[in-house]
Amino acid sequence: MTVRTIAEAKAHAKSLRNALAADGTVLGQAQALELVARQNGARDWNTLSARLANADSPRSICEPFPGRLAG
């Protein structure tokens, strides 16, 4: 599983909580977020959310263009 946005990660955490609750296992939201983070290769939720926030942010005008310009 690979999440692309923070909203998607939170939705996965909610789904995980609901699935476990159906089997009688109580899991807090923070615990579910930590598990989702680990499933996506991050050390913890803070690391994953920072990575996703950086991926969502627009490129700075000072950053080099990663391709070639036509012309």
Image: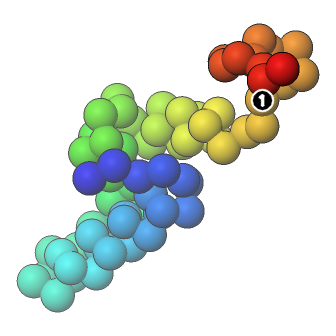
User: Which residue is at the far left?
Assistant: 23
User: Which residue is at the far right?
Assistant: 61
17 over 8 or under it: above or below: below
Q: Secondary structure at mark 1?
A: loop
Residue 13, given in percent of the width and then of the height, sits at 37, 64
45 over 67 or under it: above or below: below
**For the C terminus, which image quadrant?**
top right
* Residue identified by numbered label 1: 59
- Camera-nearest residue between 58 and 16: 58
Residue 18 appears left or right of 12? left
Structural crowding at the residue carrying mark 1, measured as other residues with C-alpha within 10 Å and reported as few (<14), some (14–19) or many (≥20) = few
Residue 30 appears left or right of 64? left
Asked if one can make out residue 22 in the rendered structure from this viewpoint, the answer is yes
Residue 30: quadrant of the picture: bottom left
Residue 5, given in percent of the width and then of the height, sits at 54, 53
Residue 31: quadrant of the picture: bottom left
Residue 32 appears left or right of 60? left
Asked if one can make out residue 46 in the rendered structure from this viewpoint, the answer is no
Residue 46, given in percent of the width and then of the height, sits at 51, 37
Three-letter residue code for mark 1: Arg
